[in-house]
Amino acid sequence: MNIDKNLLKLTSKTKSSFVISIISGVVASGFTILLAHFLAKSINQIFLENKTLSDVSNYLFLFIIAAILKAFFIWFERNKIDVVVGDVKKNLREAINKKLFEDKGNILLNKQSGGLTNTVVKGVEALDTYFSEYLPQLFLSALTPILILIFVSPIDILSGVVFLITAPIIPLLMYLIGSTAEELNRKQWKSLNRMSGHFLDVLQGITTLKIFNRAKEEIKQIEMISNAFKTSTMKVLKIAFLSALVLELLSTISIAIIAVEIGLRLMYGKMDFESALFVLILAPEFYLPLRKLGSRYHAGLEGIAAFKSIQKLLTSNSNKNEINSSQSKFRNGDIEFKNVSFKFPSRETKALDDISFTIEMGKTVAIVGESGSGKSTIINLLMQFLKLENGDILISKNRLLDISESEWHKQVSWISQKPHIFHKTILENISIAKKDATENEIIEAAQNALIHDWIIKLKDGYKTIVGERGTTLSGGEIQRIALARAFLKDSPILLMDEATSSIDSIYEQELISSIKRLSKNKTVVIVAHRLNTITNADKIIVMDSGKIIGEGTHAELLISSKKYQNLYNTFKREM
Amino acid sequence: MKQTLIKILKLLSPYKWWMLLASLMGFLTIGSSIGLLMTSAYVIAKAALHPHIGELSIAIVGVRFFGISRGLLRYAERLFSHDVTFNLLAKFRVWFFKSIEPLVPSKTGKFTSGDLLTRVVSDVESLEHIFIRVLSPPIIALLVGILVSVIFAFFDISFAIAFLIPYLLAGIVIPFLTYKLSAKIGEDIISLRSRLTELSLDGIEGKNELISFGKLETHNREFNDTNNKLIKLQRRMNLISGMNESLIGLMMNIAIIAIFITAVPLVKSGAISGISLSVLALGTMAAFEAVLPIPLAIQYLNNSIKAGNRLFQITEQTIEDKKRFWITSDAESFPNVLIGNLSKKDRFRVEASRNDTNLTKQRYLKNKKKSNLKLKGENVELKNINFSYRKNEEVLKEISIKINTKEKIAIIGGSGAGKSSIINLLLNFWKINNGSISIDNIDYNEMSEEDIRSVYSTIPQKIFLFSDTIKGNLLIAKPDATDSELWSVLQKAELKKFVEALPNKLDTWIGNQGKQLSGGEQKRIAIARAILKDSNIFICDEITADLDSVTEMNILNTIHSVTKEKSLVYITHRLVDMDKFDSIYLLENGKIVSAGIHSELLINSEQYKKYFEI
């Protein structure tokens, strides 16, 4: 059956709640037996022993008490299991979250953020039904029938035998369903997902379909695919339902057999009515937990599948930077790369191959090269987003790895090609760069980044919430907000990774002069794929497939580097 | 709420008989259980009186019959109800696609963004389960309630009442009460959950920002707080919803006691036999199975209505915007599926104009004639066009552009200047306020959308590739193209070598919406697609905006060589190779501020010169 040991381990801290919950479930079953007893007794006394209502009123009273207590314990069982579920969900989410942040590039590089979020939110939620419905039911479906068996067997051994024979067949059957029909079923659900994917695809592509005059045909396509899916799925479901049918038949026919058997024995005086009624009332209750387990089988499978992807995430190599105990203080100075190499685990070739260069304090250095030449990797290593494995990076002669990460990040402003905008207000999105920034400082930063005018035109101005539920931003607007952050942070080192790639030509000129102001007295590293922003740099480094193939000023490189000439010529055609 | 439900039910109406049949099977399944327990109770109670075996035989047959029928009926129910669900699945998808197809991209705006659309799809999916989850349980519970009441009334009418009161409490009052108690919590849970999703996305995508600004701890605190709050609320919710099962069970026992107490005096007086005591008690037990799924059904009902609301909002809000145009000038092209959503007056107008046989006939003939014309796209003319997306916000003013055969036109300007709006008008995604557009001197108003789009091969700014193979993506442009045709367009788009090197060649799966391809490769697929369509006029909208200089150069060279024998409308804010164009239109704030060839503009136009001062 689907008990995953690692999953069970998650409940270790709340074991007592889990056990109490299971006990409550068993106690509730105990009351079910009592109820059957009182009812059988009351009916027997009226029906055969000629008693009056007041004679049986004691039993009726006890019946009601037992009914109330049973209701309470069923509720309590659920209540207690929720403690377990809540704890599991809380811990798992925190663990995944922590894992994501200590990771240096690995998980995030290989996975799509949407899928990861799904694991964090929905994947963990899928465990809810596993722990709240499937797992306790697994225990109860073993314990409750045993309890009933204990009470029924002494009264009527034959019924006990019927129970004993049929009960193990049900889990066995479920196992068979699990290995054959459920497998088919699962495949089918997968293809349902694929079909949903197709539907999403065509919805997003309607404009494209219209451009090619194909939108109307697509309606037929959707209909066709849906119908084909229906036909194939129904075939599979028929098998799956058939197994369920056998299961259902087994329990109802058993009840029928028991009813007839006790009826006949009753007739020949081999049994008394009260016992017979007691057994009959309990017969459906005997099979109920097993049937419930069957209906929750899917939740069990889903929970385990979800847990597998969570576990994979949690146990993946997290590639942390070792924290050095002898942390030295940050001192501003030259930045030096010494024989740095870097390779992404998923790729064959090195992203950086034995790179050495120096960025003098207060100077502007530009890195150019075609996409994939390793420019951004240099920035990512400097920011410690990637783990430095070969070679050394020195800041004012101190190893970068020896400087505390948070101390280092305070000194660096980083503007990426695709800056992230948080699901918050614009104000919060800019002020993230500086603790306790005043409104004036924020506005000034926005003005410097040429985004202020755009912001105040919005209905809620700086209080506008951006992101999916709010205003969506264009690439240029996002980059200007990121620039505003850099203005606000005003740190001695500035790293710009293609920071103006999405900005319109009309802003470009003004922005360049604005960036020039920002760069004053700072050490600046610019990665660029358009050359207009960097011709004035103090030094330009030309990269090609992970190697430095040229270094010098614009004028020098135009003479010495063929690659640079090419890059520049392409750019010049734009003028 | 009611209205939404009615609209959803209308969509379901073609399947009403199937749904009824499936519910009937569900009802008979529980009916069998009731039958099984009641006949069983009869057998043992009767047996206790030691009758002749013959007196039991019919009842024993009954026990066997019900013992078998329950399983079979359950099987039938599942089969029917899943059949209905799959039919609904096709139905809802087609309905939604048909409803929004005419509205894209003009008025669907933000909703076409990926994440929102994902939500839309899950909304459609939640409607597909409306039968099994929402409609079927109450129908079954209702039928079971009626059946049991009728049977019990045969013994005595008071039994029906003793049964019905707890049954209704369990089936209606308790589920609604717990639902009402937890409704507010449920909403809070939903909003907390989406906040958690946002936070988790922020954490994953904004990880580097959080690290570099030293905000990791703040973020983690917020994440953990939200998570804790969510879990607390979910627990509170479960405390309430957990009462359902308990209370329904309690109601069943109360029903048994009530029936017992009602029965005793009747048994004593001899009005009914003592056998009925057991029969009634066990019948009651079996009947309550029908109300167990009701609490969940209410929850799902609420979800379905919310999903329906969101969907109708998309399909209907957009009609509001398009309505005027359709009603006044193009009634017969008003989508049939949407007519039901119009107000009475508007519907009347649409229908009246359709009924105007003369007009319709005329238009029909005219359209037909024009369709057979097979437009060549030799010239396109925009004359004095004004255009606005929203009222009073003109984005294009007095635009006049003429594109002659094989002419290369560039439209340039900053963002928001109105460049892409011109494309939207050319492709007839939007209607102009005034002025006229014509192809080969035939006005747009006299052509169908399909005719208009047949003359353009478009490479849009945001390229959309389907999650399909390379071949599948190309065939959209020409479904009956042969493989050798595909190879020849790939060669023209300079993608042949790349595709040849792939292990599966044309049948290579390009990943989720082409994500396995680089930006440049995606562009080239789109170019190949446009070449395959082989229309006379090529439209390129900002196709190099997010490419590096080298790739940009290569793509541009490809475009110019491909369009040698074609007309070209090229939209850009990056002024590259401007000397290759026959005329350049510089757009600012929706107006053409300069027009001419590159060398002239460099001398005459201050605005144009500004672009080159950088």
Image (cartoon, coloured by chain):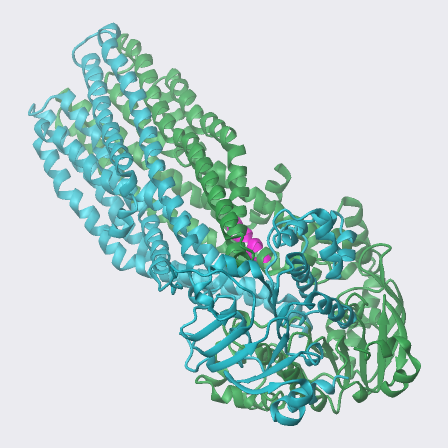
Please state which of residues B394 and B289 is positioned toward the viewer in this rendering.
Answer: B394
Q: Say which colour chain A has.
A: cyan
Residue A473 image offset from top left, x and y in percent: 68, 59
Q: Is residue B484 above or below residue A164?
A: below
Asked whether residue B125 is drawn in magenta, I would say yes
Q: Image check: A530 left or right of B137?
A: right
Q: Quadrant of the C terminus of chain A?
A: bottom right
Q: Is residue B564 above or below residue A214?
A: below
Quarter residue B375 falls in:
bottom right
Please state which of residues B240 and B330 is positioned toward the viewer in this rendering.
Answer: B240
Please state which of residues A413 and B64 is positioned toward the viewer in this rendering.
Answer: A413
Q: Which residues are magenta?
A: B117-127
Q: Image check: B414 left or right of A436?
A: right
Q: Residue furthest right?
A: B604
Asked whether residue B479 is drawn in magenta, I would say no
Figure chain in green: B
Residue B380 image offset from top left, x and y in percent: 84, 79
Quarter residue B53 falls in:
top left
Residue B335 image offset from top left, x and y in percent: 71, 58
- Can residue A553 be seen from the camera position used here? yes
Residue A102 image offset from top left, x and y in percent: 42, 58
Q: Which residue is pictured at 72% across the width and 54% down the height? A: B318
Q: Which residue is pictured at 40% across the width and 56% down the height? A: A99
